[in-house]
Amino acid sequence: MNPSFVLFDLLSGNVITDFASESDAWDSLCRDASEAGLESIENLSLLRIQDGHPTLVAMEDELVRRVAHEMSQVASKR
C-alpha cells in the first residue's frame, strides 16, 4: 500500500488535511507559508502513514526550516 501524508495541528489535535504524496504536502505548506507567513505553520506536524503506522516527517521548528528552505529553492530557480 502506498503511503499517505497527514498534516496535523498540534494545538488543536486535529488533522488538517491529507496528501497522496510528500511533494504534494510540501507544495501545500509552501503555498500556505507564502500567503500567511512561516509563523502560520509553526504548530503543525507532517506525518507519513504507511500500513496504518505513522512516522514523523517534520514538526514545529524543523517543519518551518524545511518549508523555508523549499521556498528559497523555488525562488532561486526564478
Image: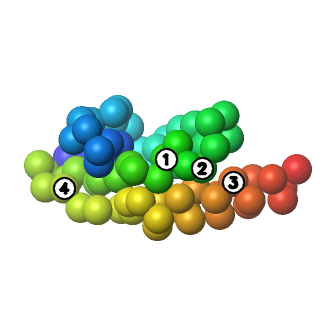
**In x, y percent, where is residue 62?**
46, 67
**Any part of residue 50 in sight:** yes
Q: Is residue 30 above or below residue 36?
A: below
Q: Residues within 10 Å of mark 4 (few under 14, many from 20)?
A: some
In the picture, measured across the screen, residue 61 lies left or right of residue 30, that is: left
Determine the secondary structure under disc 3: helix
The dot on residue 41 is: 1
Q: Mark 2 — residue?
A: 38
User: In the image as oriented, which residue stretches furthest toward the right?
Assistant: 78
Disc 2 and disc 3: Cα gap in Å? Answer: 10 Å
Residue type beneath disc 2 = Leu
Type of residue at label 3?
Met
Mark 4 or mark 2: name the one nearer the start of the chain: 2
Q: Position of residue 53 (x, y in %)?
A: 13, 55
Q: Which residue is mark 4?
A: 54
Judging from the image, what secondary structure is the residue with disc 2 in?
A: helix
Identify the residue at image location x=22%, y=50%: 49
Q: State the CA–CA distance, disc 4 to disc 2.
A: 24 Å
Residue 60, percent from left and from top: 41, 59
Identified by mark 1, the residue type is Ile
Which residue is at a point 38% across and 60% down the rendered structure image? 59
Q: Which residue is mark 3?
A: 71
